[in-house]
Amino acid sequence: MGTSRTNPQAARRAPRAAAPASPWAQAPAREAQREAKRNAVLSTAAQMFTERGFHATSLDDIAARLHVSKPTLYYYVKNKDEILLECVKKGLHMTLDGIEASRAAGGNAVDQLRACMLVYADIVTQPFGMCLIRIGDEEVPEPSRTELRRMKSEIDLAFRRLVAQGVQEGSLSACDPKMTAFVIAGALSWIGRWYQPEGEYSAAQVAEQCIATLMHGVLGAPAAPAKRSKKRAASD
């Protein structure tokens, strides 16, 4: 009675069954999903902080708007203080990165100053920028408060340097760069307090009009004196 033998080569040629797909995403995909959800938490919180104020907004409120449970939030943030800190940091980093990109684009001091002003005005109409403007530094615990103030001072110094450069080039009127930078940043920052997305003007229109006023002032050119006729001048 013969015995059947398995051909080793045939066994090697036999196709293997495909492994079932893993229901768990790979590490990069999981991290991307987590970061997207964390950003959603921060963006929603920033919007609510500007609408209601920091102290009047609870984690329960944020969770309710996101349609998740409060414990779910703790997977992405430690507490409300951390949320506020991250929101303000995002607003500052967006501003500093935008200003640096505007300056790197080149042009004379006035071109760079106007580009930086456009960046600043645009960001303060967005949730993180509004949170940066509307929430005071005193709301952020130390040592983060000192770090945030340092970053804010970088924005001020960027405007000062551009104003000073413009004065040196002769493209801006002689002025005190420090005071002028305070006026520019103060005026543009205030947009973040009164701007309403559903209002009469778009964010771009608000930015353009405010910057035009800051760059050109509100006084019109003086009217030219009326020319007197020769006959009237002779009779005087």
Image (tube, grey):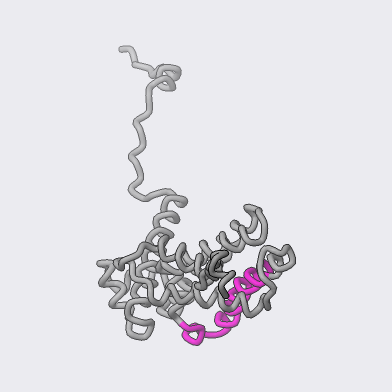
Q: Nearer the viewer, residue 73 or 102?
A: 102
Decide if residue 193 is on the left or right side of residue 91. Answer: left
**Residue lying farthest to the top in this orientation:** 1
Decide if residue 52 is on the left or right side of residue 156. Answer: left
Residue 143 belongs to the span the image colors magenta: yes
Q: Position of residue 224 (x, y in %)?
A: 55, 67
Q: Position of residue 174 (x, y in %)?
A: 69, 73
Residue 181 visible: yes
In the image, what residue occupies the spot 64% across and 69% down? 158
Quadrant where the image shows the C terminus: bottom right
Q: Main secondary structure of the magenta part?
A: helix
Where does the magenta region start and end?
136-163
- Vertical order, 16 against 73 (above or below): above
Residue 182 belongs to the span the image colors magenta: no
Decide if residue 81 is on the left or right side of residue 144. Answer: left
Q: Position of residue 214 (x, y in %)?
A: 53, 70
Q: Nearer the viewer, residue 151 or 158?
A: 158
Residue 73 visible: no
Quadrant where the image shows the N terminus: top left
Query: Image quarter for residue 170?
Result: bottom right
Decide if residue 107 is on the left or right side of residue 197. Answer: right
- Vertical order, 18 against 110 (above or below): above
Q: Position of residue 26 (x, y in %)?
A: 43, 48
In the image, what residue occupies the spot 39% across and 72% down? 46
**Residue lying farthest to the right in this orientation:** 168
User: How many numbered marks does the figure carry?
Assistant: 0
Query: Image quarter for residue 42?
Result: bottom left
In the image, what residue occupies the spot 63% across and 80% down? 179
